[in-house]
Amino acid sequence: MIGSLRGVLLDRSVRRDGSGEVLVEVAGVGYRVVVPAGVLGQVGDLGAPTFLHVHTHVREDAIILFGFSTREERACFEMLIGAHGVGPAVGLALLSVHSPAALRRAVATDDADALTLVPGIGKKTAARLLIELKARLDIDLDAPELVGVGAVGAATGGSLAVRGEVRTALAGLGYGADEVRAALAALPEEGTVEDLLRSALRDLATQR
């Protein structure tokens, strides 16, 4: 079982489902590795050395390598695919939209709306995933990113509540899930609802 790869980055591309794929050459052998979208910008330049933490997924018809920038991302992915109804595709999609810390926040606060930002996950699926993931993810409510956040119900942490309001406002203005997800990802961590909404609308206006 392959647990990591260190080699030269030969190629990278975006897959049709929004995830990424890289080609890493190790000792003359090129390994195709599927990665979360965010990893594409972290693996370095073509022709440069790169390193990935790898999960080897074995199916009857294929062996697929999933790569991650950190050990935490790989561990989170492995916990995700251990949940009922969460296969590698869904696990990768979740980590393409949310970092492990953001995903734990969403699960700890029952934030189904955050999960619906992931392509292919609707409200019913998000509600089911919250139940499944509570039993799988290692959620420490004393962790810095969760301080002030209740284990059940809406977040009481200021920034999380603000971003939730911005997300609701953008959806109410008619923006699609992909547009909302991209706009939220580009926002700073802190700010008022008005400031962040104004910033998101500016970004969205330039993309249309």
Image (cartoon, grey):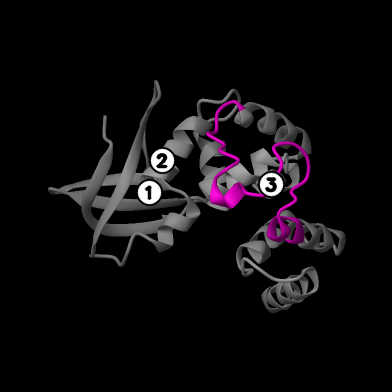
Residue 154 colored in magenta in the image:
yes
- Under circle 2, the secondary element is helix
Tell me the kind of residue under disc 3: Val
Tell me the kind of residue under disc 1: Thr
Q: Earlier in the sequence, mark 2 or mark 3?
A: 2
The residue under label 3 is: 149
Give the extent of the magenta segment.
135-162
Query: Distance from label 2 to label 1 (Cα)?
Result: 7 Å
Instruction: From the viewer's perspective, tell me whether residue 118 is left or right of residue 53.
Output: right
Residue placed most toward the observer, 95 or 208: 95
Q: Which residue corresponds to the image point at 69% horizontal and 37% vertical from the top-left?
A: 151
Residue placed most toward the observer, 51 or 58: 51
Q: Which residue corresponds to the image point at 57% horizontal and 30% vertical from the top-left?
A: 86
Residue 160: x and y in percent read 70, 56
Q: Earlier in the sequence, mark 1 or mark 3?
A: 1
Magenta stretch prevailing secondary structure: loop
Residues at discs 2 and 1 in contact (Cβ within 8 Å): yes
Give the vertical position of 91 relative to 81 (above or below). below
Residue 19: x and y in percent read 50, 50
The label nearer to you, 2 versus 3, is: 3
The residue under label 1 is: 70
Give the vertical position of 178 relative to 129 (above or below). below
Instruction: From the viewer's perspective, tell me whether residue 190 is left or right of residue 40.
Output: right
Query: Distance from label 2 to label 3 (Cα)?
Result: 25 Å
Residue 16: x and y in percent read 53, 50
**Residue 74: numbered disc:** 2
Q: Residues within 10 Å of mark 1 (few under 14, many from 20)?
A: few
Q: Which residue corresponds to the image point at 13% horizontal and 49% vertical from the top-left?
A: 28
Give the vertical position of 87 relative to 112 (above or below). above
Q: Which residue corresponds to the image point at 48% horizontal and 57% vertical from the top-left?
A: 38
